[in-house]
Image (tube, rainbow, N blue to C red):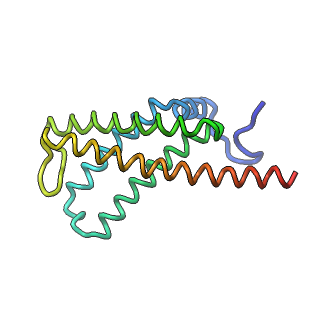
Amino acid sequence: MTRYTPTGAPAVPPSRAVSLRAISRSTLELAGLTGIALRLYRAAILTLESMSSWPVFIGALLVGVVFVCGVLTWHLSNFPIKSWARRVALFVAIEVIAEFGMSSVLIAIGREPLGTGLATWADWWPLAGQTLLERVVVLGGYAGLLAGAMWVVTRRGQDQK
């Protein structure tokens, strides 16, 4: 039987651990929820008055990047490194599609911010392209760095045996 927590560590109740693990293994659910959460977070931070300060705005963007990279790490931790490229590509595709869907809803109800105004349907394709490019660069680059770090750590562990 595989142990997921070290001996003596506080245990997560089994029912909660199973459901959290099931969610973290499902690319569709995890990436979809992440895309919806990121688009709502983006809409919230761009409409706040306090975001007129550059340091606060950059900090809010970094929180979003750390969140999406953390979720991707949580997802990838369930799989061997060999399958990460396929998993990352699928995660990015689903996450961006979910963001496009949420963006459509926000545009329909007149709440999708763009610059100092609101986005219209004519702005949807440029927003979608920008989102796709950002996710591919950020998540692809992060996954590559993560895979490299994991390869070094596992090689070091094999060399010490």
Q: Is residue 70 left or right of residue 35?
A: right
Percent across and percent down for residue 7 are 77, 45
Q: Is residue 42 left or right of residue 113?
A: right
Q: Quadrant of the N terminus?
A: top right
Query: How many marks are shown on the rendered structure?
Result: 0
Q: Give above or below for 130 relative to 22.
A: below
Q: Give above or below for 48 relative to 43.
A: below
Q: Residue at x 13, y 57 (%)?
A: 116
Most foreground residue, 141 or 23 = 141
Most foreground residue, 12 or 97 = 97
Q: Residue at x 48, y 50 (%)?
A: 69
Most foreground residue, 104 or 9 = 104
Percent across and percent down for residue 18 are 60, 30
Most foreground residue, 105 or 115 = 115
Percent across and percent down for residue 117 are 11, 53
Res. 52 image quadrant = bottom left
Percent across and percent down for residue 68 are 44, 48
Res. 111 image quadrant = top left
Q: Is residue 108 left or right of residue 94?
A: left
Q: Residue at x 45, y 54 (%)?
A: 66
